[in-house]
Image (spheres, grey):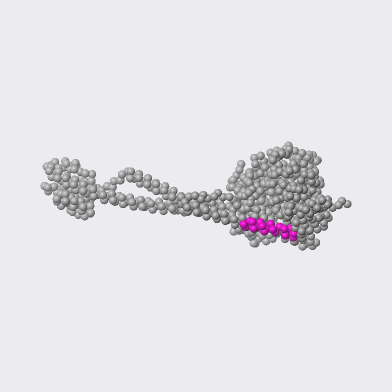
């Protein structure tokens, strides 16, 4: 039997840390706790860790600097779920500075964390690592559009803001992270499953058509998202590598 | 009368009326004075004139006298020979002065008679040396105004009116500016500073107003910060409690605790959102596609399995309705209105339409609605309607307050109204219309 995934929880609040460890172990995972960056490095040096749950606010070195360290070039890929007491920091955590794989605002229920942990593990195993530029940028430009990562909306050439739903944004983000690469429906479904929505009962095809509508893309002759028969979808517009 | 309802109208009226009255009084005095002077001059000339005319007539043969009479006429009297002199019945001050001066100059008594004839003030009666009666018919004095006097008067009046208008405007304009500033006072929104120039009273008022504005902003900021701090510090204990509940074996107890904690958490989140709404002004404005914003907001709810649907589009779902606004704040507004509709009505219907020529987003529900006298109160933070609308739902009383705070920053206004057939319609109408 395959050994259970090992989750390392880095949080300075002993109560929260211990309860999370107890809960995750009860759910059949292996879990350990670390109170700060030093303890975290000790565990990482000693054992194999499959996923890191990292609190943003830590005494001494905070979650931001630890996350940067783990994301530095040459480090082995380690999925990170960030915990934060401030919901409005989500964008910094996910997109811009840190590149965490998911984030959970405090307060949260233990099963929410479990769901995130499972989905991040699943996702990182089934998808090839992103091939788009690794240094995160606040804006991604392609064709006539700019995707604003902070505000999570599109801006057209005239500067008009075109809003995106959560699922639409996630789909577009995944496509932009893997340009010129065919992604199948399963992969897309996993990646776009709402962080806030437990149920996702719409097909990927419907979601793709919604994103095409936002991009004002022609279904018969799409410029941005092409359908690959029996395989999936591919984002075919080259990204502009400007600042 | 309409103009009298304004301070401007009243002041102009008071000033103009009193100035006009004073002017009229002065005019009357001047005219009376001039009349007196003219009379004095007239009396002395008349006495000398009539005396010399009488002396001339004395020397002329009686048959030549009538031919000379017209030549001896003056503008203010004419002479008549041989007519009845009449009784001495005129005792006006003028008559007394005239008769005494004439009597002095002629050396004989002179009578003054009332004359009923038009244009004749009085008849002075005297006799030539040969005893022929000579009547002097004094014309009624005519008030002679030079035309330039009228012009001057009109010019003076115009000057007075202009001066009044200007002076009153000086006094009322700062008041209007102050009222404007108070009206547009929007916490968190930088307002144009009142000019601290002008008369000292005005500068003082502007200064006092600015300080009041600053104090209001400080109070609001303090309130937001306190709310934010409390909400923020509650998060760690709530997190611990949720985790403790997760570790409970008793499923019923666990679910109940989760429900309670969920409500607490909602309150914390809304408190933080309310505190943060003060900073929405920092989001920059951008032209925003309203249809896309609504579609994506509704899609989020539909993806989460919520009964939210779009029931109407302005010009079809593909038409781009673009307004200048703050898209993130607007998204929060729409989210709060939909949350409200879901909470109280169980389902939400979203509509993009034109009201009074401006695009408006409307979120409708079939809930219990809001009584007319509560419509304003529900916009205040933490206000809850006791009876129907809140019993089982446990709202925070912050959702609409947040919308109310964000709407002006989005260049829009919130309006709540009862929906036809029951329920509530919450509209966010934009102030300007692009494209």
Please give the name of the residue rendered at 18% of the width and 54% of the height, measured from the top-left corner: B88
The magenta segment is B222-242
- Residue B363 image point, x, y percent: 65, 51
- Residue B263 image point, x, y percent: 70, 59
With B187 as the anchor, is B232 left or right in this view?
Answer: right
Instruction: Determine if the magenta segment contains residue B340.
Output: no
- Residue B181 image point, x, y percent: 54, 51
Please give the name of the residue rendered at 19% of the width and 54% of the height, measured from the top-left corner: B89
Give the camera-side residue of A11 and B75: A11
With B253 as the anchor, is A3 left or right in this view?
Answer: right
Type of secondary structure dominating the magenta stretch = helix
- Residue B391 image point, x, y percent: 67, 61
| Residue sitting farthest toward the right | A1
With B39 as the anchor, is B225 left or right in this view?
Answer: right
Please give the name of the residue rendered at 83% of the width and 54% of the height, measured from the top-left corner: A30
Can residue B73 be seen by looking at this rendering?
A: yes
| Residue sitting farthest toward the top | A221
Instruction: Determine if the magenta segment contains residue B228.
Output: yes
């Amino acid at each position: 039997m395959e050994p259970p995934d090992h989750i390392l929880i880095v949080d300075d609040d002993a109560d929260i840390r211990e309860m999370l460890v107890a809960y995750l172990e009860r759910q059949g995972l292996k879990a350990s706790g670390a109170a700060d960056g030093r303890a975290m490095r000790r565990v990482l040096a000693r054992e194999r860790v499959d996923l890191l749950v990292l609190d943003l606010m830590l005494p001494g070195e905070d979650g931001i600097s630890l996350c940067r360290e783990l994301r530095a070039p040459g480090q082995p890929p380690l999925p990170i779920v960030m915990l934060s007491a401030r919901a409005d920091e989500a964008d910094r955590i996910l997109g811009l500075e840190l590149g965490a794989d998911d984030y959970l605002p405090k307060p949260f229920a233990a099963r929410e964390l479990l769901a995130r942990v499972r989905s991040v593990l699943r996702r990182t195993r089934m998808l090839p690592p992103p091939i788009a530029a690794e240094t995160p940028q606040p804006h991604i430009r392609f064709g006539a559009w700019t995707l604003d990562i902070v505000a999570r909306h599109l801006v057209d050439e005239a500067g008009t803001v075109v809003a995106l739903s959560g699922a639409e944004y996630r789909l577009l983000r995944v496509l932009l992270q893997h340009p010129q690469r065919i992604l199948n429906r399963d992969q897309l479904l996993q990646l776009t499953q709402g962080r806030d929505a437990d149920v996702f009962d719409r097909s990927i095809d419907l979601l793709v058509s919604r994103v095409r509508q936002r991009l004002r893309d022609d279904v018969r002759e799409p410029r941005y998202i092409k359908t690959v028969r029996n395989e999936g979808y591919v984002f075919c517009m080259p990204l502009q590598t400007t600042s | 009368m309409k103009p009298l309802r304004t301070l401007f109208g009243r002041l102009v009226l008071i000033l103009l009326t009193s100035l006009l009255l004073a002017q009229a009084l002065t005019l009357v005095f001047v005219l009376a004075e001039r009349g007196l002077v003219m009379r004095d001059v007239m009396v002395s000339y008349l006495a000398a004139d009539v005396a010399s005319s009488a002396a001339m007539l004395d020397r002329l043969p009686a048959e030549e006298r009538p031919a000379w009479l017209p030549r001896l006429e003056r503008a203010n009297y004419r002479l008549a020979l041989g007519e009845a002199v009449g009784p001495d019945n005129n005792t006006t001050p003028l008559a007394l002065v005239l008769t005494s001066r004439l009597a002095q100059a002629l050396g004989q008594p002179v009578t003054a008679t009332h004359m009923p004839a038009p244009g004749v003030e009085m008849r002075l009666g005297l006799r030539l040396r040969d005893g022929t009666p000579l009547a002097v018919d004094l014309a009624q004095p005519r008030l002679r105004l030079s035309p330039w006097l009228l012009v001057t008067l009109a010019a003076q009046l115009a000057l007075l009116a202009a001066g009044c208008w200007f002076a009153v405007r000086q006094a009322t304009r700062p008041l209007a500016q102050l009222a404007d500033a108070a009206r547009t006072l929007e916490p968190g929104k930088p307002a144009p500073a009142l000019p601290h120039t002008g008369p000292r009273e005005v500068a003082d008022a502007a200064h006092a107003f600015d300080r009041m504005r600053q104090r209001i902003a400080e109070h609001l900021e303090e309130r937001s910060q306190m709310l934010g701090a409390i909400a923020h510090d509650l998060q760690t204990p709530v997190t611990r409690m949720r985790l403790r509940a997760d570790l409970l074996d008793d499923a019923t107890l666990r679910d109940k605790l989760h429900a309670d904690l969920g409500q607490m958490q909602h309150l914390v989140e809304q408190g933080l959102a309310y505190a943060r709404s003060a900073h929405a002004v920092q989001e920059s404005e951008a032209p925003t596609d309203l249809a896309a914003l609504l579609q994506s907001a509704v899609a989020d709810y539909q993806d989460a399995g919520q009964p939210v649907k779009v029931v109407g589009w302005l010009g079809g779902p593909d038409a781009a309705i673009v307004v200048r606004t703050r898209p993130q704040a607007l998204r929060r507004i729409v989210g709060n209105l939909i949350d409200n509709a879901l909470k109280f009505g169980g389902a939400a219907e979203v509509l993009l339409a034109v009201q009074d020529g401006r695009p408006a987003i409307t979120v409708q529900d079939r809930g219990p609605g809001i009584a007319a006298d509560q419509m304003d109160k529900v916009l205040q933070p933490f206000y809850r309607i006791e009876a129907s609308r809140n019993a089982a739902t446990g709202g925070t009383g912050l959702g609409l307050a947040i919308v109310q705070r964000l709407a002006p920053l989005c260049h829009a206004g919130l309006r709540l109204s009862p929906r036809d057939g029951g329920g509530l319609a919450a509209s966010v109408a934009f102030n300007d219309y692009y494209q």
